[in-house]
Image (cartoon, helix red, strand yellow):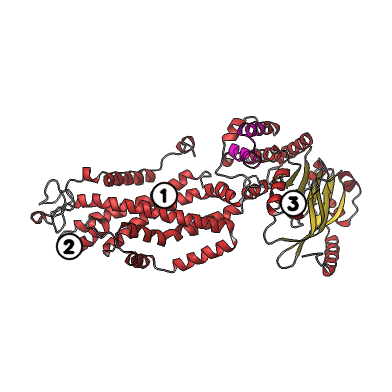
Amino acid sequence: MEPCLDIRGLSAVLPNGQRVLRSVSLSVQPGEVRALVGESGAGKTMIGKAVLGVLPKSVRVVEGEMLIEGEDLGRLDAKARRTLIGARTALIPQDPLTALNPSRRIGAQMTDRLVRILGWSGERADARIRQLLDEVQIRDPERVLKSYPHELSGGMRQRVLIAAAFAAEPRLIVADEPTTALDVTVQKQILRLIAQLQRDHGTAILFVTHDLGVVAKISQKVSVLYAGKVVEEAETAQLFAAPQHPYTRALIAATPRYTDPYASLKPVDESVLAGLTAEIAAADKDWRPSHG
Amino acid sequence: MDEARISRRPVSPRLWLAGCWLLMALLAAIFAPLIAPQDPLAQDLMLERLPPFWLDGAEPGYWLGTDSLGRDLLSRLIFGGRIAFIVAFAAATSACLLGSALGLIAGYFGGWPERIISRVVDVWMAFPPVLFAILLVAVLGTGLSSVILAIAIIDWTRFCRVIRAEAMSQARMDYVESARIAGYGRIGIMLREVLPNVLPSVVALLSLEMGIAVIVEAILSFVNLSISTDDPTWGSIIAEGRLSIHQAWWVLVFPLITLILTVLSFSQFGEALKARFDPVLR
């Protein structure tokens, strides 16, 4: 089956030549949830931004390809790329507080995209939005649609953003730590909602997170990222049952367990990190971008 | 922003006071020929330097007294308000449109447009504004349109700097990124996502700028570089009052009070409006 998202050997550098992504390859099959896990700074968010075409100006892709449903983004001109990304992908952002425009009503923000970008009629967009609000279990859509973002709680805003992400039936959703900014009780509900909608709509999700507990709950496959490099890739169950890479093992060992809440938090094993850093530094020495 | 949302917040007293003064002054200026008790240009040497109504020797009908040529001060202030308001609205609006547009472009697009616009602003700000205004009017020639143009040319930087900074912080917001992902064009995002969020600041600055325009016009009148006709302006009344300060203090004091109240009201009105229109109640 043709993958929904196919990243092949993607490398990116900062202006000072430092590599932020190191030949990253990963593919997401249609309808599959692929978790992208790693510590902060490992480049998880960077991969999401690269897929969506919103990398910071300072980050430059120097090699590799990205294909969305078989179409190579690198071969398209800027306009065609924007159209493709806009039509087939969506983002569930990390921080629901800054992801909605504070001076526009929720309803206008949600229908706007369907009407202006995808050319739907106003009534069709409105009906669609209401249907999605129902799916994310918002009981009073009238009030929510008329509200400004600051009038809603963080959890409500995230529900709105999830509804908005699924509204245009994208093939791929990038979920960038969608539960990190929420409090723990709300996190569970939001996670369950995303899983529910993902199943109902058959949407592929690239799920960026640092939380292995979330990975275990939601994903079928995992890529473990360290310093912009995929160190291990496996089926989720396989990864937890028999982690292959020492870093993965260290990461799992450092995860707090609810069974023993009084155990002190353990950092990731230093010696593993030192070994990994040396390995990456050695690889960087010989590395030259294949083009550009 | 509909009425329902606005009316939830109580009207602040400063918005009330500032609004009332501005409305009163504006209505008086518009209906000046109906309201002014005397002809503002009529001279009568028999009536020169009459004191205001509560002092001995005041004449009925000349409420705030007369100047050294026997012209009624209240009528002159009312007619002077016409020029003050025309300049305030026209000059502030022009400066606002020019400065906000450039500021929005610089702040949102960044890159070379930002560099060029910022350098121009830096150079502009190096000129002392009042001298710059006097120089401009001297070059453009006196007259109402020259005064308006001069104020707009000088003060657009005030809008440009503030709006540039606000647009810059808006451009980094996640909803701008989401709009990019959805496929909106850059101009569309600038107008739809960024502009509404900087609008409260534009409104506040616009009102403040109207006050500043009134002052600049008064300064230009004071140095006799504003409107070349005999029409009274607040600045020219102050200039005449300065000459007879020891014989008739009221000719200086009343236009000064009018000027200060108007400028203060404009700035307070702007601040209060900003607080009201800001959706997040910052």
The residue beneath circle 2 is: B244
Seen from the viewer's position, the closer of residues A232 and B54 is A232
Question: Which amino acid type corresponds to the residue marked 3 in the rendered image?
Answer: Val
- Could you say whether the residue bearing mark 2 is in a helix, strand or loop? loop
User: Do the numbered discs 3 and 1 sit on residues whose CB atoms are within 8 Å?
Assistant: no
Camera-side residue of B54 and B240: B240
Q: Which residue is mark 3?
A: A51
Where does label 1 land, which residue? B270
Residue A233 rendering spot, x and y as whole percentages: 86, 51
Quadrant of the image occupied by residue A41: bottom right
Q: Nearer the viewer, mark 2 or mark 3?
A: 3
Q: Amino acid at mark 1?
A: Gly
The region drawn magenta spans A105-129
Label 2 lies in what chain? B
Q: Is residue A254 visible?
A: no
Please give the chain letter of the residue carrying mark 3.
A
Nearest the viewer among B98 and B139 is B139
